[in-house]
Image (tube, coloured by chain):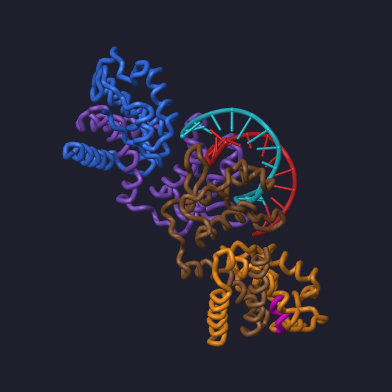
Chain colours: A purple, B blue, C orange, D brown, E cyan, F red
Amino acid sequence: MFVFDLSPSSPIPIYRQIVDQVARAIASGALKAGDELPSVRAAAQSYVVNPMTISKAYSLLEQQGLLARRRGMGMVVSADRAPVPALDRLHLLQPALDQAALTSQQLGLSPRQAIAAFRQTLTTLYQESTDE
Amino acid sequence: MFVFDLSPSSPIPIYRQIVDQVARAIASGALKAGDELPSVRAAAQSYVVNPMTISKAYSLLEQQGLLARRRGMGMVVSADRAPVPALDRLHLLQPALDQAALTSQQLGLSPRQAIAAFRQTLTTLYQESTDE
Amino acid sequence: MFVFDLSPSSPIPIYRQIVDQVARAIASGALKAGDELPSVRAAAQSYVVNPMTISKAYSLLEQQGLLARRRGMGMVVSADRAPVPALDRLHLLQPALDQAALTSQQLGLSPRQAIAAFRQTLTTLYQESTDE
Amino acid sequence: MFVFDLSPSSPIPIYRQIVDQVARAIASGALKAGDELPSVRAAAQSYVVNPMTISKAYSLLEQQGLLARRRGMGMVVSADRAPVPALDRLHLLQPALDQAALTSQQLGLSPRQAIAAFRQTLTTLYQESTDE
DNA sequence: GTGGTCTAGACCACT
DNA sequence: GTGGTCTAGACCACG
């Protein structure tokens, strides 16, 4: 069963965190067509969140065509979704890269410096997840 | 005169866009002590923004000690601000890098791919500003 | 044996689709007194539907007096049902017409356009069923 | 200012009624780009509905690109929406026509009868709105 | 059991 | 003033 990683204190609304995580999990293939998601009530209890917050996230994902409702039987990953090819996944990363590049430029840093810092950040992050 | 780059449709509030851009310009040395900023009225008119929004941004920058209010003469960059050393500027870049790295990981991309895409993004951006 | 035309993805609940179709078939004379309906189990298997859904639909039809339960032998169309006169059948059509007319008006279409489109729709539909 | 026609007793959820009506009004040209909608609070008070219900409808319309948020200044009809050509508006009517045609067929009515009844329905409805 | 809708009311952010 | 988010809790429809 899929696990969310929610930060209630983050400025990003909870429902948005859920939407983003599910969307990325589908894009990366971690969630496949037909996979079930935690029920609204179960997720609400697990993450100590109001059921409506979970429901709102699921509804948005349904509208995007990523999830499908099975009446009375919960939500599943939509059938018509192939894992997104790596090239398109890079597109999903682009906004974050644009932001970082712009900030770097406005700070007067060189591309060399920015890339070095990004490499360091990536290394640390990916190592953490390997450690677990 | 300093020029803002504002996107009303961005999820980042307008006043925040202003604050960030001014702060970075000062950190990078693009804005130096004594440099004048556009008046609230002028900026509001130029960028089709509510004057209160400009004013709020200036007030925040004043609170941070980056700008100083000269009565009847608009805002100027504070005198006591030396350009921030490159090492500290990297710290200002870190949040954007964290976001990009996290997104990359959730999309199932390799660090190699992410760095290559970031290098490309930087190259394009820095070239544009050279062209002008 | 009577055939249902069920759309699991339709916003109309499955049990309602069944009820409506059987009721209309009886009204039009397509189903006559004594005609048998598929057993709950058979229908559930054929249409990949929860048996309770079929059962619920049959129960509703029984309540309306359209179907009769013969113990151990499935459901049959009630004996006391004469085909509904055409005038009354028009009444059963009215809600669908009301909906179409209202939509047409809200879209700013002329009655002329709406009727032309409806005629086209009917022609296509009736032709299809003749072809089979 | 745009006026809704809400039926709290209808099986169609209130937020859906709002979404449909606004979408049709934009499609028909009754609402034009830049037109303002009633504020969430004002509408909630006028129609004796919870503000969240209005807000939900507006959010859905924003997602569809029909409405745009002006931060702190309410919702307006999105700028990039030309009135939908009549041909496309007929497409929006099609589902209702399909439903009516199918019902008519299942009732064993002739196309002639169905069209006559539809014409009558349209005439009554359009006259009513002229009378007002 | 499942999700959907709605309410009442609180708090926050933006302009 | 504007809309957005979240909660707590009720009720409904579907399978």
Q: Which residues are magenta?
A: C22-29
For this orientation, the residue located farthest to the front is: B72
For this orientation, the residue located farthest to the top is: B80
Q: Main secondary structure of the magenta part?
A: helix
**Can residue D63 be seen from the camera position used here?**
no
For this orientation, the residue located farthest to the left is: B131
Q: Residue at x 59, y 67 (%)?
A: C105
Q: Residue at x 31, y 50 (%)?
A: A86
The picture places residue D100, in percent across and down from the top left corner, at 62, 74
Q: Quadrant of residue C24?
A: bottom right
In front here: D88 or A64? D88
In front here: D46 or B128? D46
The picture places residue A97, in percent across and down from the top left corner, at 31, 39
Q: Residue at x 31, y 23 (%)?
A: B91
Q: Relative to B128, is B49 on the left or the right? A: right
Q: Relative to A84, is D107 on the left or the right? A: right
Up/down of B99 relative to F15, above or below: above
Q: Relative to C32, is B6 on the left or the right? A: left
Quadrant of the rendering where the C terminus of chain D is positioned: bottom right
**Can residue C47 be seen from the camera position used here?**
yes
Q: Relative to A4, is A48 on the left or the right? A: right
Up/down of A63 relative to B74, above or below: below
Q: Is residue B29 magenta?
A: no
Q: Is residue C27 magenta?
A: yes
The picture places residue C22, in percent across and down from the top left corner, at 70, 75
Up/down of D44 relative to C3, above or below: above
Q: Quadrant of residue C26?
A: bottom right
For this orientation, the residue located farthest to the bottom is: C130
The picture places residue B85, in percent across and down from the top left corner, at 24, 18
